[in-house]
Structures are given as C-alpha cells and as structure tokens.
C-alpha cells in the first residue's frame, strides 16, 4: 500500500491524499508537480527514477487506510548537483 506521504520532500508544501499535484517515484519519494517539472527535471534526486502522478485515495478509505504523517524533507535542498 502506498504511504501517501504528507508533503513534498523538496519544498515541504502539503500534499494531502486528495491532491492531484503529488508525484511519486517507484520508491515513493514524494514531490509536488512544480518541483518535479522545475528543479528536478522529471527525475527523482534520490534514486534517479521516473515519476508518476500519485493516485488519489478515495476519501472513504482514509479512515481505514490512513496516509502517512511522517514528513520527509531535504533541508539542504533537492536540486541535483551538477
Ligand atoms: Zn515541491
Ligand atoms: Zn526516488
């Protein structure tokens, strides 16, 4: 089951389970769409993998299958070092 992490690792914006802006890689590294399209260039800075849009979990399932509350954030910045 997806963790549904609550924020973008890059800019720390909120990504609630109903957000259409959340993007994940195959390891569930989670970022917002604007970071993926912008600073990340469509590539996960942690694993180098591609992103897909995170599916929205139906609101009725959230009480039984709650999203993660653990915020992951890279305070040193998430831009790929060239
Ligand atoms: Zn972001
Ligand atoms: Zn990744």
Image (cartoon, rainbow, N blue to C red):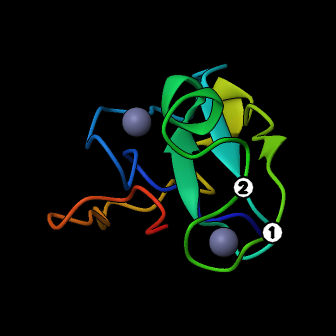
Q: How many numbered marks appear?
A: 2
**Which residue ends up furthest to the front in the rendered image?**
82
Q: Please provide percent x and percent y for residue 74.
A: 26, 66
Place residue 72 in its image quadrant. Answer: bottom left
With respect to residue 19, does 30 lie above or below?
Answer: below
Mark sitting earlier along the chain (2/1): 2
Q: Tell me whether the residue at label 2 lies in contact with that at label 1, contact meaning CB atoms closer than 8 angstroms.
A: yes
Q: Is mark 2 within 8 Å of ligand 2?
A: no
Where is the N terminus found, in terms of image quarters?
bottom right
Q: Is residue 27 left or right of residue 4?
A: right
Question: Which structural element holds mark 1?
Answer: loop
With respect to residue 2, does 14 lie above or below?
Answer: above
Residue 63, visible in the rendered structure: no
Q: Please provide percent x and percent y for residue 15.
A: 44, 33
Q: Residue at x 66, y 41 (%)?
A: 41
The label shown at residue 43 is: 2
Q: Please provide percent x and percent y for residue 40.
A: 56, 46
Place residue 42 in its image quadrant. Answer: top right
Residue 50, visible in the rendered structure: yes
Place residue 29 in its image quadrant. Answer: bottom right
Q: Please provide percent x and percent y for residue 36.
A: 61, 38
**Which residue ends up furthest to the left in the rendered image?**
75
Ligand 2, image quadrant it occupies: bottom right
Question: Which structural element holds mark 2?
Answer: loop
The label shown at residue 15 is: none
With respect to residue 62, does 58 lie above or below?
Answer: above
The label shown at residue 49 is: 1
Q: Residue at x 52, y 23 (%)?
A: 34
């Amino acid at each position: 089951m997806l963790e549904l992490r609550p924020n973008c690792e890059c800019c720390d914006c909120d990504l609630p389970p109903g957000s259409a802006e959340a993007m994940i890689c195959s390891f569930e590294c989670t970022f917002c769409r604007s970071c993926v399209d912008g600073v990340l260039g469509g590539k996960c800075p942690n694993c180098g993998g591609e992103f897909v849009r995170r599916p929205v979990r139906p609101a009725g399932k959230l009480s039984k299958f709650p999203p993660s509350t653990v915020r992951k954030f890279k305070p040193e910045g998430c831009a790929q070092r060239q």
